[in-house]
């Protein structure tokens, strides 16, 4: 069971913070706060789930950014400020969905500013830990502490630590909710790339991950959507039709939103809906907090649209009504039929 008490929940997102100079395929540029620990925390906070990033920032990280994070309802007491610069990237997004990262700070800062050592004492405070994409030795450190403290966890692999690291990665997948992207699935299983469509590749990949010992799987399929599965359930969910300004952080926000829904309801489909809505918010602008969070009305409409795309939406709607009461009242699918389906 994923579900925990609403009065004691705390999701920790262990990973990195960064300062990102981004260029999108249309030539638009933006400079904004980023990092997988922050984006995944934002994804959960959109659904009002108690969350705190576990990370390090440099001495140059703007105090105003930290204050804004706190105003979003995200815990900031596990963000540790250390000497030196914050991780800083120039990121170029291609039309294909691929990204090119250029380090504007020394590459070693990614290791230095990932949580480790005494930072990990905070893990015991969590009811769930999300291990975001970091160098695999640092991911292993967080997971080792999670296992020692009895804290369940989810794992988002780092694409640069797959090929040549398979044995170690497979060991980390055991007992996790594993959350790879389509790219990372292809790196792990090259036989599933090429002629495989996302909707046929994902079930096969999920089956393999479950055989490796994952408790559940959520595969991020970019503009197509996502696929979720465990030993007794599987479902595909198409993405919301949102204009993309900057796709950086979408997968991380999906992870946070997914966990907010899944941990509240113990339902993979609700998790997929929440993750999809969080990702849709992030891609609408540059940076982790480019605008106010979606309103309850927007989240209701997006949830209705997504659940209207799959069979039998009444069960998940009942779970949303019960565990996210601030979303009420439930919209009528019929009332949405005549609207522009570009929710949000």
Image (tube, grey):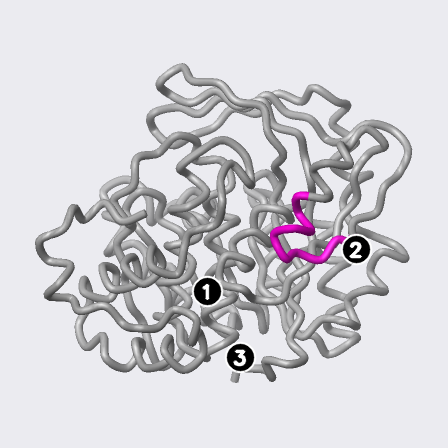
Q: Nearer the viewer, residue 211 or 271?
A: 271
Q: Is residue 75 magenta?
A: yes
Q: Residue furthest top?
A: 27
On the rendered structure, is 318 left or right of 283? left
Distance of label 1 from label 3 (alpha carbons): 18 Å
Distance of label 1 from label 2 (alpha carbons): 31 Å
Asked which secondary structure carries label 2, the reply is loop
Mark 1 neighbour density, 10 Å: few (under 14) some (14–19) many (20 or more)? many
Q: Residue at x 22, y 59 (%)?
A: 305
Relative image position of residue 126 (x, y in whole percent): 72, 71
Vertical comparison of 166 with 153: above or below: above
Relative image position of residue 42 (x, y in whole percent): 56, 51
On the rendered structure, is 67 left or right of 177? right
First in sequence, mark 1 or 2: give its number.
Answer: 2
Vertical comparison of 88 with 242: above or below: above
Q: Is residue 56 magenta?
A: no
On the rendered structure, is 150 left or right of 156? right
Q: Which residues are magenta?
A: 68-78
Q: Nearer the viewer, mark 1 or mark 3?
A: 3
Q: Nearer the viewer, residue 275 or 224?
A: 275
Q: Nearer the viewer, mark 3 or mark 2?
A: 2
Q: Which residue is mark 3?
A: 2
Asked which secondary structure carries label 1, the reply is helix
As drawn, the label of residue 78 is 2
Distance of label 3 from label 2 (alpha carbons): 24 Å
Magenta span: chief secondary structure: loop
On the rendered structure, is 252 left or right of 153? left
Q: Nearer the viewer, residue 215 or 118?
A: 118
Q: Which residue is mark 1?
A: 209
């Amino acid at each position: 069971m994923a579900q925990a008490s609403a009065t004691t929940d705390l999701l920790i997102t262990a990973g990195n913070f960064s300062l990102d100079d981004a260029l999108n395929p249309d030539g638009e540029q933006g400079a904004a706060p980023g990092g997988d620990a922050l984006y995944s925390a934002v994804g959960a906070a959109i659904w009002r789930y108690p969350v705190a990033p576990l990370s390090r920032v440099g001495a140059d990280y703007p105090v105003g950014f930290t204050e804004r994070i706190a105003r979003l309802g995200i815990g900031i007491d596990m963000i540790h400020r250390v000497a030196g610069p914050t991780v800083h990237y120039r990121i170029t997004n291609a039309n294909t969905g691929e990204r090119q990262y250029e380090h504007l700070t020394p590459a070693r800062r990614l290791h230095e500013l990932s949580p480790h050592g005494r930072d990990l004492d905070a893990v015991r405070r969590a009811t769930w830990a999300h291990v975001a994409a970091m160098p695999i030795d640092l991911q292993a450190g967080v997971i080792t502490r999670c296992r020692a403290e009895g804290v369940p966890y989810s794992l988002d692999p780092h694409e640069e630590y797959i090929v040549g690291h398979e044995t170690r990665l497979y060991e980390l997948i055991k007992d996790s909710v594993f959350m790879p992207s389509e790219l990372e699935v292809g790196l792990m299983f090259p036989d599933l790339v090429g002629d495989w469509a996302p909707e046929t590749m994902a079930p096969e990949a999920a089956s393999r991950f479950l055989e490796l010992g994952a408790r559940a799987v959520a595969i991020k399929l970019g503009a197509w959507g996502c696929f979720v599965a465990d030993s007794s359930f599987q479902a595909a969910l198409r993405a919301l039709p949102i204009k993309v300004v900057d796709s950086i952080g979408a997968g991380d926000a999906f992870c946070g939103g997914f966990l907010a829904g899944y941990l509240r309801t113990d339902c993979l489909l609700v998790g997929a809906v929440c993750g999809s809505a969080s990702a849709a918010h992030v891609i609408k602008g540059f940076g982790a907090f480019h605008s106010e969070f979606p309103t309850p009305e927007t989240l209701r409409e997006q949830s209705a649209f997504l659940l209207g795309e799959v069979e039998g939406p009444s069960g998940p709607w009942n779970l949303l009504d019960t565990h996210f009461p601030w979303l009420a009242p439930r919209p009528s699918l019929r009332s949405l039929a005549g609207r522009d389906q570009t929710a949000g």
